[in-house]
Amino acid sequence: MTRIDFHTNIPDKLSYACRLARKAWSTRAKLVLLAEDAAQAAALNDALWTLSETDFIPHVLAGDPLAEQTPIIVTDREDVALPHYEMLVNLTRRTPGTFAQFARVFEIISTDEQDAAAGRQRYVAYKKQSYPLTHFVAGQS
C-alpha cells in the first residue's frame, strides 16, 4: 500500500521539491515531480539545474527520450507514460489519479491558506481509505 507523507507549512514549494529531489538522488531513488501546470513544471526544471553550483541532479521532463534512464522526472500531466513509480512528489492542489501506483507519495503543502485547505481535504480522503500517513510540519522541532 502506498505510504503518504504530508509536508506542510512549506514557504517555497519549488525549492523544497528540489531539496527532496537531491535527497532522493543521493540514495539512488527514482522520483516523479508532479507540478500544478506547465509553467510550474518549467520553473521546477530550471530550479533543478540551478539548485547548487556543486550538485548535479539528473532529471528530464516526462516524455523526453532519456526518461527511461533518468531517475527524476518532472511533469504537469498525469496522462503521460512514466518510466518508474517509486516516489511521487505532489506539488498540485489535487489528488493525483495515479498516486496508488507509487510506493510513496510526498504531499507538499505551502503556507497559502487555499493550498493548506486543499491539503487538509486530501489528508482526510487518504485517511478514509486507510492509507498509512505521516505528517511533518516545517519550522517545528
Image (tube, helix red, strand yellow):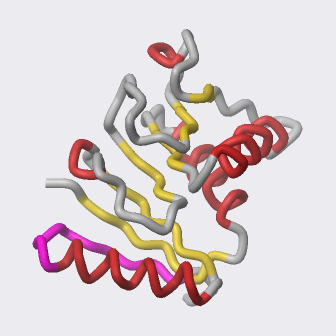
Which residue is nearer to you in this view: 14 or 54?
14
Q: Please tell me whether residue 124 is drawn above or below residue 56 in the rendered image.
A: below
Q: Position of residue 130 (x, y in %)?
A: 11, 72
The answer to which quarter of the image holds residue 59 is: top right
Image: magenta residue range: 128-137
The answer to which quarter of the image holds residue 123 is: bottom left
Residue shown at 43% from the left, 34% from the top: 30
Residue shown at 26% from the left, 73% from the top: 133
Q: Residue furthest top?
A: 65
Q: Position of residue 71 (x, y in %)?
A: 50, 27
Which residue is nearer to you in this view: 94 or 131?
94
Q: Is residue 18 left or right of residue 25?
A: right
What quarter of the picture does the C terminus occupy? Answer: bottom right
Q: Please tell me whether residue 92 is drawn above or below residue 71 in the rendered image.
A: below
Q: Is residue 114 magenta?
A: no
- Number of marks: 0
What quarter of the picture does the N terminus occupy? Answer: bottom left
Q: Is residue 136 magenta?
A: yes
Q: Please tell me whether residue 84 is drawn above or below residue 45 in the rendered image.
A: above
Q: Position of residue 23 (x, y in %)?
A: 56, 47
Residue shown at 40% from the left, 41% from the top: 78
